[in-house]
Amino acid sequence: MTLTTSRLLLRRFNETDLAFIETLGTTPLYHQTAGFAKIQSEAQGQQILNVYQRRTESYLIITQATHEKIGLIELSERSVDPQSELYATRELGFLLLQSAWGQGYMTEAVTALLDDAFPRLQLREIWAGHYENNQPSAIFLQKMGFQYRYEVTLPFYFFEQTVEKYYLLTVSDWQRFRNK
Protein backbone atom coordinates (compact mmCIF):
# COMPACT_ATOMS: atom_id res chain seq x y z
CA MET A 1 0.00 0.00 0.00
CA THR A 2 1.13 3.54 -0.78
CA LEU A 3 -0.16 6.81 0.64
CA THR A 4 0.31 10.15 -1.09
CA THR A 5 0.00 13.73 0.05
CA SER A 6 0.57 16.98 -1.78
CA ARG A 7 4.34 16.73 -1.18
CA LEU A 8 5.03 13.19 0.01
CA LEU A 9 4.87 9.56 -0.92
CA LEU A 10 4.64 6.99 1.87
CA ARG A 11 5.50 3.53 0.59
CA ARG A 12 6.45 0.15 1.98
CA PHE A 13 10.15 -0.63 2.35
CA ASN A 14 12.02 -2.58 -0.33
CA GLU A 15 15.60 -3.71 -1.03
CA THR A 16 16.56 -0.34 -2.52
CA ASP A 17 16.21 1.22 0.95
CA LEU A 18 19.25 -0.43 2.57
CA ALA A 19 21.50 2.63 2.18
CA PHE A 20 18.88 4.84 3.83
CA ILE A 21 18.54 2.40 6.76
CA GLU A 22 22.35 2.37 7.09
CA THR A 23 22.39 6.18 7.16
CA LEU A 24 19.94 6.18 10.07
CA GLY A 25 21.82 3.41 11.86
CA THR A 26 25.20 5.11 11.61
CA THR A 27 24.06 8.58 12.73
CA PRO A 28 24.39 9.11 16.51
CA LEU A 29 21.64 11.77 16.53
CA TYR A 30 19.02 9.16 15.57
CA HIS A 31 20.25 6.70 18.21
CA GLN A 32 20.04 9.35 20.92
CA THR A 33 16.74 11.01 20.00
CA ALA A 34 14.74 8.17 18.43
CA GLY A 35 16.39 4.98 19.64
CA PHE A 36 17.24 3.84 16.13
CA ALA A 37 19.54 0.81 16.36
CA LYS A 38 23.25 1.29 15.77
CA ILE A 39 24.39 -0.40 12.59
CA GLN A 40 27.98 -1.54 12.33
CA SER A 41 27.80 -3.78 9.27
CA GLU A 42 25.83 -4.23 6.08
CA ALA A 43 24.43 -7.47 7.53
CA GLN A 44 23.00 -5.58 10.51
CA GLY A 45 21.50 -3.01 8.15
CA GLN A 46 19.92 -5.80 6.12
CA GLN A 47 18.43 -7.35 9.28
CA ILE A 48 16.81 -4.05 10.25
CA LEU A 49 15.53 -3.50 6.71
CA ASN A 50 14.02 -7.01 6.79
CA VAL A 51 12.13 -6.09 9.97
CA TYR A 52 10.67 -2.97 8.34
CA GLN A 53 9.71 -4.99 5.26
CA ARG A 54 7.81 -7.52 7.42
CA ARG A 55 5.85 -4.89 9.34
CA THR A 56 2.63 -4.18 7.48
CA GLU A 57 2.27 -0.57 8.67
CA SER A 58 5.86 0.67 8.18
CA TYR A 59 6.48 3.26 5.49
CA LEU A 60 9.37 5.15 4.01
CA ILE A 61 8.73 8.89 3.62
CA ILE A 62 9.81 10.26 0.22
CA THR A 63 9.46 13.74 -1.22
CA GLN A 64 7.45 13.78 -4.45
CA ALA A 65 9.41 16.71 -5.91
CA THR A 66 12.92 15.25 -5.55
CA HIS A 67 12.24 11.56 -4.71
CA GLU A 68 14.51 11.99 -1.68
CA LYS A 69 14.10 9.51 1.17
CA ILE A 70 13.65 11.70 4.24
CA GLY A 71 12.20 9.53 6.99
CA LEU A 72 10.10 6.67 8.18
CA ILE A 73 6.77 6.29 9.92
CA GLU A 74 5.00 3.26 11.31
CA LEU A 75 2.13 1.99 13.40
CA SER A 76 3.34 -0.97 15.46
CA GLU A 77 0.95 -3.59 16.73
CA ARG A 78 0.47 -3.68 20.48
CA SER A 79 -1.21 -7.11 20.30
CA VAL A 80 -1.72 -9.75 17.63
CA ASP A 81 -4.66 -11.32 19.47
CA PRO A 82 -7.97 -10.07 17.99
CA GLN A 83 -9.65 -10.77 21.35
CA SER A 84 -7.28 -8.43 23.21
CA GLU A 85 -8.30 -4.86 24.01
CA LEU A 86 -4.88 -3.81 22.70
CA TYR A 87 -5.70 -5.16 19.23
CA ALA A 88 -7.55 -1.94 18.34
CA THR A 89 -4.54 0.17 19.33
CA ARG A 90 -1.19 0.90 17.72
CA GLU A 91 2.00 2.74 18.62
CA LEU A 92 3.19 5.48 16.31
CA GLY A 93 6.89 5.64 15.53
CA PHE A 94 8.50 8.26 13.33
CA LEU A 95 11.91 9.57 12.35
CA LEU A 96 12.82 12.38 9.98
CA LEU A 97 16.25 13.27 8.65
CA GLN A 98 17.54 16.39 10.37
CA SER A 99 17.82 18.13 6.99
CA ALA A 100 14.00 17.85 6.64
CA TRP A 101 13.09 19.17 10.10
CA GLY A 102 10.85 22.22 10.40
CA GLN A 103 9.25 21.92 6.95
CA GLY A 104 5.94 20.31 7.92
CA TYR A 105 6.77 16.95 6.39
CA MET A 106 6.06 14.90 9.50
CA THR A 107 2.75 16.68 10.09
CA GLU A 108 1.78 15.76 6.53
CA ALA A 109 2.94 12.14 6.89
CA VAL A 110 1.24 11.54 10.26
CA THR A 111 -1.99 13.11 9.03
CA ALA A 112 -2.06 10.87 5.96
CA LEU A 113 -1.25 7.75 7.95
CA LEU A 114 -3.81 8.38 10.70
CA ASP A 115 -6.55 9.47 8.29
CA ASP A 116 -6.06 6.11 6.57
CA ALA A 117 -5.34 3.86 9.56
CA PHE A 118 -8.06 4.83 12.03
CA PRO A 119 -10.92 3.69 9.74
CA ARG A 120 -9.10 0.97 7.77
CA LEU A 121 -7.71 -0.80 10.84
CA GLN A 122 -10.71 0.13 13.01
CA LEU A 123 -8.44 1.60 15.66
CA ARG A 124 -9.76 3.24 18.78
CA GLU A 125 -6.47 4.75 19.98
CA ILE A 126 -2.84 5.35 19.07
CA TRP A 127 0.02 5.74 21.51
CA ALA A 128 3.31 7.52 20.85
CA GLY A 129 6.41 8.06 22.91
CA HIS A 130 9.53 10.16 22.85
CA TYR A 131 12.76 10.22 24.78
CA GLU A 132 12.97 12.86 27.48
CA ASN A 133 15.80 14.60 25.60
CA ASN A 134 13.66 15.00 22.46
CA GLN A 135 11.55 18.10 23.14
CA PRO A 136 10.72 18.71 19.47
CA SER A 137 8.84 15.38 19.43
CA ALA A 138 6.92 16.37 22.59
CA ILE A 139 5.84 19.61 20.95
CA PHE A 140 4.96 17.81 17.72
CA LEU A 141 2.82 15.14 19.40
CA GLN A 142 0.87 17.75 21.35
CA LYS A 143 0.38 19.78 18.18
CA MET A 144 -1.09 16.67 16.52
CA GLY A 145 -3.64 16.22 19.32
CA PHE A 146 -1.87 13.60 21.44
CA GLN A 147 -2.35 13.95 25.21
CA TYR A 148 0.48 13.24 27.67
CA ARG A 149 -0.28 10.21 29.89
CA TYR A 150 2.83 8.89 31.69
CA GLU A 151 6.58 8.30 31.62
CA VAL A 152 8.71 5.23 32.14
CA THR A 153 12.42 4.74 32.75
CA LEU A 154 13.91 2.44 30.13
CA PRO A 155 17.21 0.57 30.49
CA PHE A 156 19.26 0.47 27.33
CA TYR A 157 21.84 -1.96 26.13
CA PHE A 158 23.50 0.45 23.73
CA PHE A 159 23.59 3.60 25.84
CA GLU A 160 22.63 4.71 29.32
CA GLN A 161 19.18 4.57 30.83
CA THR A 162 16.62 7.07 29.58
CA VAL A 163 13.10 8.24 30.27
CA GLU A 164 10.38 7.83 27.65
CA LYS A 165 7.21 9.93 27.82
CA TYR A 166 4.00 8.46 26.40
CA TYR A 167 1.04 10.19 24.77
CA LEU A 168 -2.40 8.98 23.71
CA LEU A 169 -4.60 9.91 20.76
CA THR A 170 -8.10 8.46 20.65
CA VAL A 171 -10.16 8.25 17.49
CA SER A 172 -12.54 10.92 18.85
CA ASP A 173 -9.58 13.22 19.67
CA TRP A 174 -8.32 12.71 16.12
CA GLN A 175 -11.72 13.55 14.64
CA ARG A 176 -11.87 16.73 16.75
CA PHE A 177 -8.33 17.64 15.71
CA ARG A 178 -9.14 17.13 12.02
CA ASN A 179 -12.36 19.18 12.27
CA LYS A 180 -10.59 22.27 13.66
Image (tube, rainbow, N blue to C red):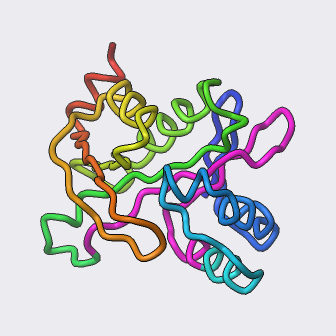
Q: Which residue is painted at 84% across and 32% down in the image?
A: 65
- Front position in the image: 3 or 102: 102
Q: Give the percent coordinates (x, y) of residue 47.
A: 63, 83
Q: Give the percent coordinates (x, y) of residue 68.
A: 81, 44
**Of all residues shown, which one is farthest toward the front?**
160
Q: Give the percent coordinates (x, y) of residue 134.
A: 43, 41
In the picture provided, is 28 more to the left or to the right than 33?
Answer: right
From what the image shows, is residue 156 above or below residue 111?
A: below
Q: Give the percent coordinates (x, y) of residue 44.
A: 67, 82
Q: Which residue is painted at 46% across and 32% down in the image?
A: 136
Task: Tell me if residue 63 is in the magenta stretch.
Answer: yes
What segment carries the magenta color?
Answer: 51-79
Task: Tell me if residue 78 is in the magenta stretch.
Answer: yes
Q: Which residue is painted at 70% across and 64% down in the image?
A: 26
In the picture provided, is 87 more to the left or to the right than 96?
Answer: left
In the picture provided, is 41 more to the left or to the right than 72?
Answer: right
In the picture provided, is 2 more to the left or to the right than 99?
Answer: left
Q: Quadrant of residue 143?
A: top left
From what the image shows, is residue 37 above or below residue 174?
A: below
Q: Quadrant of residue 108?
A: top right
Quarter the N terminus occupies:
bottom right
**Of all residues shown, which one is farthest toward the bottom?**
43
- Front position in the image: 133 or 78: 133
From what the image shows, is residue 85 above or below residue 132?
A: below
Q: Quadrant of residue 161?
A: bottom left
Quarter the C terminus occupies:
top left
**Of all residues shown, which one is farthest toward the top?**
180
- Front position in the image: 34 or 170: 34
